[in-house]
Amino acid sequence: MANPEGSAKHIVFFITTASAEEGERIARSLLEERLAACVNIVPAVRSFFWWEGKVQEETEVLLIGKGRADHFSKVQALVRALHSYTVPEIISFPITSGLPDYLSWIDDSTLPPGPR
């Protein structure tokens, strides 16, 4: 049962990709594996970051996923298997509160907890 007060049971996660095609492939895989209830794709994110000792600039695609905290290790494994970057951004934030119906929808749309 979803906790309207939040319990870090649910997460929002960010993933950046090099292209829309890569982002779509990862998003669809996360949904097909039921590791995410929803993935938003934000095109043309301008990113500045340190890499190999200097500041880099790239246009990337940002994926914003919603899912369960207990599946995050599986999210990371799937993304690493499909991603073109050596060190992809795969980070999560706890959902500390939310509309109870929405949190229940996340539960209903993803794998049940536990091993698969």
Image: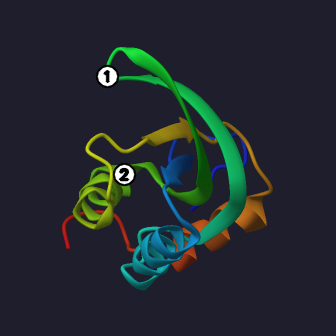
- Quarter of the image that includes the N terminus: bottom right
Residue 62 in the image, given as x and y percentages of width and height = 61, 53
| SS state under label 2 | helix
Q: Is residue 100 above or below residue 27?
A: above
Task: Write down the residue under mark 2.
Answer: 72
Residue 51 in sight in this render? yes
Q: Is residue 7 above or below residue 29?
A: above
Residue 84 in the image, given as x and y percentages of width and height = 32, 58
Between 74 and 48, the one lying in front of the other is: 48
Mark-to-mark CA distance, 2 and 1:
27 Å
Between 76 and 86, the one lying in front of the other is: 86
Task: Write down the residue under mark 1.
Answer: 52
Residue 90 in the image, given as x and y percentages of width and height = 42, 44
Using a 10 Å C-alpha cutoff, classify the residue at mark 1 as few (fewer than 14 neighbours), some (14 to 19) or many (20 or more): few
Residue occupying the point 52% across, 25% down = 49
Residue 25 in the image, given as x and y percentages of width and height = 44, 78
Q: Amino acid at mark 2?
A: Phe
